[in-house]
Image (cartoon, rainbow, N blue to C red):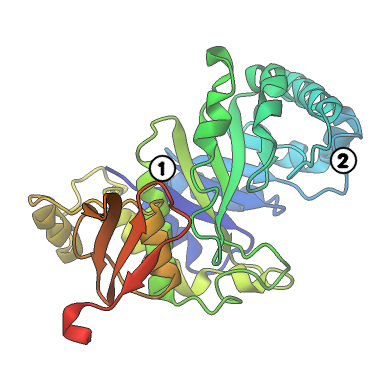
């Protein structure tokens, strides 16, 4: 099944079009770079890719949506009619139920004005872990009015998966008629404390970052209503240099293609599988050990650098108390069943 990972583009270089053509991503996002030629080139090379656009603004939902659209007038004049999905105010913060209702009203108006122009819109663009889930029901009018739901989800190096796949809980708080297709318009690694908190600032290796992205992709692939997740960010420098994935661009593109996306030649011919694709196809014939990256044992093992699991989880009883254990490369992790916050580990016999 194709990967849902793709790029949040904050700078165009001489490689990005080739990478996108290789990936044929479901979605791509462009930030604050209103170039008709860039949009048209992506459309030419990736005709089925949805393009999300966000323009920077100092405004928030306390300022009328009409004023925001007026501020975007030059960009709209340049890019309208190209099938773009437009984001509104970014990462709104709700302090009360009144704020939730005000934000909903803002997006209802935003959708009304943009639909009148023949454009599609994505609602919310909430930051990781926001908003309070019990306020989501108050946002239903906006969700109904808009075409997509936009959310941001980052992996936290200390807290682990955390709010990864929180989109499910968000979606489930909405009535059925408001559960629009979901776009994860920012994802990746963010330690949450400042501008240097991306994967480079946290000294996360490329191998580890690729595993984090692949684990998240596995979650996304479980939900058909999630259309794609844009990795923040491709290109751009200060102040977000620690998030830049240009150095991993080819590796991410290879992963997306080998996961089942692949490039369709412009002449409509059938692409021949690469060696990597053949390897993946052969591996899929065998049963893979499932890894629940959200499990307490797994997250404890990763936090303590114990490697990856070598067995499924298993239960055992000591003094009438049930424990859950799992063998990892560098140790055996265990916990009293139900007491998931108190995992411990011991060395494997051959290491004692």
Image position of 136 (left or right of 156)? right
| Residue 159 in which image quadrant | bottom right
54 lies above or below 351 = above
Query: Pointer 2: residues within 10 angstroms few (<14), some, or many (20+)?
Result: some
- Front position in the image: 178 or 99: 99
Residue 219: quarter of image: top left
* Disc 2: which residue: 71
Pointer 1 residue: 220
Depth order, front residue of 192/240: 192
Residue 65 point in image, percent of width and height: 85, 30
The circle drawn on residue 40 is none
> Relative to residue 91, is residue 262 drawn left or right?
left
Residue sitting at x 55%, y 71%: 199
Q: Is residue 131 visible?
A: yes
Q: What secondary structure is found at the residue carrying circle 1?
A: helix
- In the image, residue 37 lies at what x, y percent? 61, 51
The residue mark sitting in front, 1 or 2, is 1
Point 56% across, 66% down: residue: 158
Give how far apart the Cα atoms at labels 1 and 2 are: 34 Å
Q: Residue at x 46, y 46 (%)?
A: 44
The answer to which image quadrant residue 205 occupies is: bottom left
Name, please, the residue furthest toward the bottom.
352
Position of the C terminus, as image quadrant, is bottom left
Q: Is residue 187 visible?
A: no
Could you tell me which quadrant the N terminus lies in?
A: top left
Q: Among all residues in the image, which is located at the extreme front?
A: 319
Asked if 21 appears above or below 85 in the picture, the reply is below
Dot 1, how many residues are within 10 Å of its Cα: few (below 14), some (14-19), or many (20+)? many
Q: In the picture provided, is 301 more to the left or to the right than 328?
A: right
Q: Secondary structure at mark 2?
A: helix
Q: Is residue 262 left or right of residue 205?
A: left
């Amino acid at each position: 099944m194709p990967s849902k990972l793709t790029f949040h583009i904050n700078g165009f270089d001489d490689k990005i079009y080739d990478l996108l053509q290789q990936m044929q991503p479901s979605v791509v996002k462009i930030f604050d770079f209103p170039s008709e030629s860039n949009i048209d080139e992506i459309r030419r090379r990736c005709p089925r890719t949805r393009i999300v656009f966000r323009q920077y603004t100092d405004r928030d939902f306390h300022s009328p949506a009409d004023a925001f659209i007026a501020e975007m007038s030059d960009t709209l004049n340049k890019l309208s009619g190209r099938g773009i999905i437009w984001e509104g105010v970014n990462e709104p913060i709700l302090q009360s139920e009144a704020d939730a209702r005000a934000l909903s009203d803002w997006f209802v108006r935003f959708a009304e004005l943009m639909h009148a122009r023949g454009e599609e819109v994505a609602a919310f663009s909430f930051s990781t872990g926001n908003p309070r889930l019990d306020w989501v029901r108050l946002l239903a009018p906006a969700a109904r009015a808009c075409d997509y739901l936009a959310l941001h989800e980052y992996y936290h190096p200390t807290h682990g998966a955390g709010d990864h796949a929180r989109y499910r809980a968000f979606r489930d708080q909405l009535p059925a008629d408001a559960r629009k297709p979901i776009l994860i318009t920012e994802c990746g690694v963010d330690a949450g404390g400042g501008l240097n908190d991306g994967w480079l600032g946290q000294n996360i290796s490329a191998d580890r970052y690729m595993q984090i992205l692949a684990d998240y992709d596995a979650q996304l692939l479980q939900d058909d209503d999630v259309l794609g997740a844009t990795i923040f960010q491709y290109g751009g420098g200060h102040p977000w240099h620690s998030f830049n994935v240009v150095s991993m661009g080819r590796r991410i593109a290879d992963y997306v293609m080998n996961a089942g996306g692949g490039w369709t030649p412009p002449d409509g011919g059938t692409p021949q599988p690469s060696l990597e694709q053949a390897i993946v196809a052969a591996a899929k014939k065998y049963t893979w050990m499932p890894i629940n990256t959200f499990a307490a044992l797994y997250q404890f093992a990763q936090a303590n650098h114990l490697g990856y699991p070598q067995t499924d989880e298993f239960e055992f009883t000591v003094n009438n108390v049930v424990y859950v254990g799992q063998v990892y490369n560098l140790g055996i992790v265990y916990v009293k069943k139900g007491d998931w916050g108190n995992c411990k580990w011991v060395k494997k016999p051959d290491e004692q």
